[in-house]
């Protein structure tokens, strides 16, 4: 009795699903990094010239 059964026709789609999930994870990480960069720049500007904010 097999605990896991994979249809041979689904093996080709497995790579696509893994790639899509990896791409989505990478894009979310990029968005988070971009947000942190923007906030960091805003804090830096505020620290340098607080009178302009």
Image: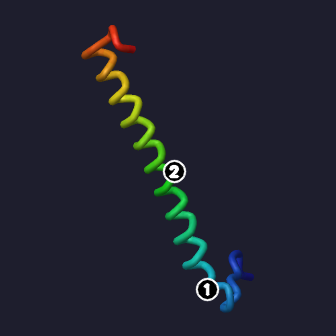
- In the rendered image, residue 39, in percent from the top left (x then y), is placed at 41, 29
The residue sitting at 69% across, 77% down in the picture is: 4
- In the rendered image, residue 30, in percent from the top left (x then y), is placed at 43, 50
The residue sitting at 52% across, 71% down in the picture is: 19
Q: Which image quadrant is residue 50 in?
A: top left
Q: Which image quadrant is residue 1 in?
A: bottom right
Residue 19, above or below 31: below
Viewer-closest of 11 and 4: 11
Q: Residue furthest right?
A: 1
Viewer-closest of 25 and 14: 25
The residue sitting at 60% across, 87% down in the picture is: 12
- In the rendered image, residue 42, in percent from the top left (x then y), is placed at 37, 25
Quarter of the image with the C terminus is top left
Say few, some or many: other residues with alpha carbon within 10 Å of mark 2 (under 14 / 14 to 19 / 20 or more): few
- In the rendered image, residue 44, in percent from the top left (x then y), is placed at 29, 23
Q: Disc 2 on helix, strand or loop?
A: helix
Viewer-closest of 39 and 49: 49
Residue 2, above or below 29: below
Single out the mark in the foreground, 1 or 2: 2
**Numbered label attached to residue 28:** 2
Q: Which residue is mark 1?
A: 11
Relative to 35, 5 lies left or right? right
Mark 1 or mark 2, which has the lower sequence index?
1
Q: How is the image coloured?
A: rainbow
Q: Residue furthest front?
A: 52
**Numbered label attached to residue 27:** none
Q: Disc 1 on helix, strand or loop?
A: helix
Residue 11, above or below 41: below
């Amino acid at each position: 009795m097999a605990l896991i059964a994979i249809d041979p026709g689904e093996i080709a789609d497995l790579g696509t699903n893994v790639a899509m999930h990896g791409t989505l994870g990478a894009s979310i990480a990029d968005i988070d990094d971009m947000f942190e960069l923007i906030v960091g720049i805003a804090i830096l500007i505020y620290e340098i010239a607080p009178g302009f904010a």
